[in-house]
Image (tube, rainbow, N blue to C red):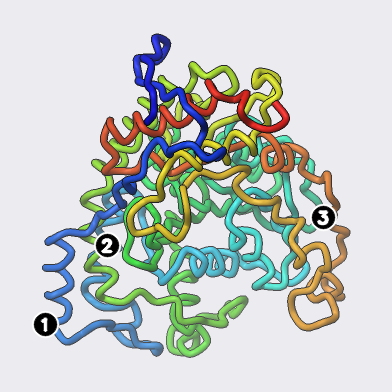
Amino acid sequence: MLSHTHNTTTGIESSLATLAINGGPKLRNKPFPGYKTMGEEEKKALKGVIDSGVLSRFLGCWHEDFYGGPEVRAFEEEWAKAFNVKHVIAMNSATSGLYAAVGAIGTEPGDEIIVSPFTMSASAVAPLIYNAIPVFADIEPDYYCLDPQSVEARITPYTRAIIVVDIFGLPYDADAINAIARKHNLKVIEDCAQAPGALNSGKYAGTLGDIGIYSLNYHKHIHTGEGAMVVTDDDTLAERLRMIRNHAEAVTEARGFETLVNMLGFNYRMTEMEAAVGREQLKKLPALLLERQNNVQYLTEKLTKIPCLKPATVRPGCTHAYYVHPIEFDAAAAEGLDRDQYVAAVKAELPPIELREGEGVKLSTGYVKPLYLQPIYQQRIAYGSHGCPWTSNFYKGNVDYSPGLCPVAEEKYSSTLMIHELMRPPFTQDDLNDVVNAFYKVWENREELSGV
């Protein structure tokens, strides 16, 4: 039987008993509620598509259906209106969107593109698709996005673009990085997979650079199973994106395209079913986003009273979409407890989330190992066995992937950062209190952990 005392600092009941990691009872056994955003609206929309008999309406030749069917086009129009952007190109994944964006800006073999080491792998692999070279810049210590000073230090005569990432849901430093891009005549591709609806100085994340990419895969804020929306205000880039999405090489002659650079096309097309679901999901984004923000605010108020925890701050002038909730671990205030011990003990107190039971408790350390430490970069093997594109005659630079290259990213991964998803709708205040109580239970019983 757990004993409880009322924590006067937080106002929340705190469990004082043997930690679950040491064989004591878990603080909570009932799974947390799953993130279920689908309802009758999506069912009705899907039924309408199925009844129409047209599940996809793209043709890979020059025809009125080159741009897709009515649901895809309507979804693009509605997204453009919602995010106040001129062009929207629906695609089958954000990975496809990133690849298409790198092609659309005219990337040449041997070009360098500056990328983040602290993101999903596709953001950094995208240059390789066009035989360009990923160059890693470090991240900001407080916000985890690309550090403008590190970005500028990585620019060489071969730099073509910067792929920024609105990591965890916070927009990048658009003022600083866009100014660097203008100074050096570079394009900015914005990976906004985690930040739909976030704002920077009143402008939506995803619309801050030359091309923005939103993700609609199953664990994002809103989703269509798989899918993405790619946005731009540039007419030329928009048409090149549409070409690459749908077998560009097959229609360049009919379209009268004289510039054939990167007009090798792919099948990056979204189905009518996905678009129909997306149209309904888009309507739900503002409410879902507000609920995340409110839940994080509640957690922040409680968790900041634990001396070794510092929930993430928000960049001035921005709002945060909280794809996950980042928390910094202060070892100096932890009285000998290390981050990995702490996280393991908190996870032992809690259950997984419904629908994602096989993933364990959605609390983890460090996010991702800095990408340049992956074998693909350490061994410089991508196309074939001879080191292409790094060994290509087109590449005249000398890129570095050595350990220590991005010290902030490495420190976040190895010792200071933790992230969790235990704040997504429909978490109730009782659910949030269980999360808080788990953090407090471990803190108040930290002497039980070995080595402390």
Q: What quarter of the picture does the N terminus occupy?
A: top left
Q: Answer whether labels 1 and 3 touch (C-beta < 8 Å).
A: no
Left or right for 330, reference 228 = right
Query: Can residue 172 be seen by looking at this rendering?
Result: no
Measuring from the top left, give residue 54's x and y in whole percent: 20, 85
Left or right for 450, reference 407 = left
The quadrant in which residue 387 appears is bottom right
Q: Residues within 10 Å of mark 1 (few under 14, many from 20)?
A: few
**Residue 51's mark?**
1
Left or right for 151, reference 199 = right
The quadrant in which residue 330 appears is top right
Measuring from the top left, give residue 302's x and y in whole percent: 42, 21
Residue occupying the point 58% across, 41% down: 344
Q: Residues within 10 Å of mark 2 (few under 14, many from 20)?
A: many
Disc 1 is placed on an element classified as: helix
Type of amino acid under label 1: Asp
Type of amino acid under label 2: Gly
Disc 2 is placed on an element classified as: helix
- Give the mark nearer the N terminus: 2 vs 1: 1
- Give the mark nearer the N terminus: 1 vs 3: 1
Disc 3 is placed on an element classified as: loop
Type of amino acid under label 3: Tyr
Residue at mark 3? 401
- Give the mark nearer the N terminus: 2 vs 3: 2
Q: CA distance from mark 1 to mark 3?
A: 53 Å
